[in-house]
Image: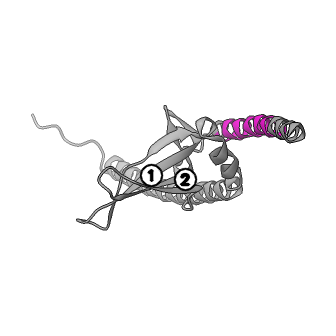
Amino acid sequence: MNERLNQLGQAAQRLNEGSDQLNALISAIDKALGRLMIGMDYVHPRPLQESMSIGRDGKRVIELCFLGYLRVQGEYHLVIKTVKILESKIALASETPGNVIPLLQAPRVLRHAAVDLFPELIQVLSNQVGDLVAQMERRCSTAKGLLEQLEGLEAQITAAREARGPEPVDS
């Protein structure tokens, strides 16, 4: 029995030390993303965790937890978004808007599972930013072309006015 307790104690210590290290890495990744000032919302489509319970009315309540990158308290952070789906006879189901908490405040099991989805999250954010950059460049080109046309038109009007000379003043 003592040996099992010792093994449990050692395993718990390794778990806590590893969890502290992982939390520090998650925090550093979150801060690095924040410094990039991406400013784009993303919620991973695959839930990290799914649980089902029965509500007071006897109907099923399904709770889904998703990894996301969303605005929390005015800044973008890695988050856990929890959504409850309530069984209903009127509609097949109704979904509540969801609760969002910073990833570092989420339960350990969700923090650890979220790390496995970081590469996908980063890839999607990168793709979204790339698409936005391409759209911005196209829009800048369009705006520049319009400005050049307007400036050319303005120059033509000015030249035509100057060619006519001063306009007579009615007295």
Whole-percent x, y for residue 108 in the image: 66, 41
Residue at x-position 83% and y-position 37%: 5
Estimate the x, y position of residue 36 in percent, counting from the top left. Answer: 65, 41
Looking at this rendering, what residue extends furthest in the right direction? 3
Residue 166: image location, x then y, percent: 27, 42
| Residue range highlighted in magenta | 14-33
**Foreground pick, 132 / 93:** 93
For image coordinates 53% across by 48% down, the residue present is 40
**Quadrant of the image for the C terminus?**
top left
Tell me which residue sits at (41%, 52%) in the image.
Answer: 84
The answer to whether residue 50 is left or right of residue 168 is right
Q: Are marks 2 and 1 in contact (CB under 8 Å)?
A: yes
Which percent across, then down, holds residue 33? 66, 42
22 or 90, which lies in front? Answer: 90
Which corner quadrant of the image does residue 7 belong to? Answer: top right
Q: Residues within 10 Å of mark 1 (few under 14, many from 20)?
A: some
Q: Which disc is residue 83 wearing? A: 1
Q: Amino acid at mark 1?
A: Val
Q: Secondary structure at mark 2?
A: strand
Query: Residue 1 shows which numbered tag?
Result: none
Residue located farthest toward the left when viewing the structure as drawn: 171
Q: Main secondary structure of the magenta part?
A: helix
Residue at the front extreme, as displayed: 1
- Which badge, 2 or 1, comes first in the chain's sequence? 2
Amino acid type, callout 2 = Phe
Indicate whether 117 appears above or below 28: below
Which of 13 and 144 lies nearest the eye of the viewer? Answer: 13
The stretch drawn in magenta includes residue 18: yes
Rendered image: mark on residue 66: 2
Residue 134 sits in quarter: bottom right
Q: CA distance from mark 2 to mark 1?
A: 8 Å
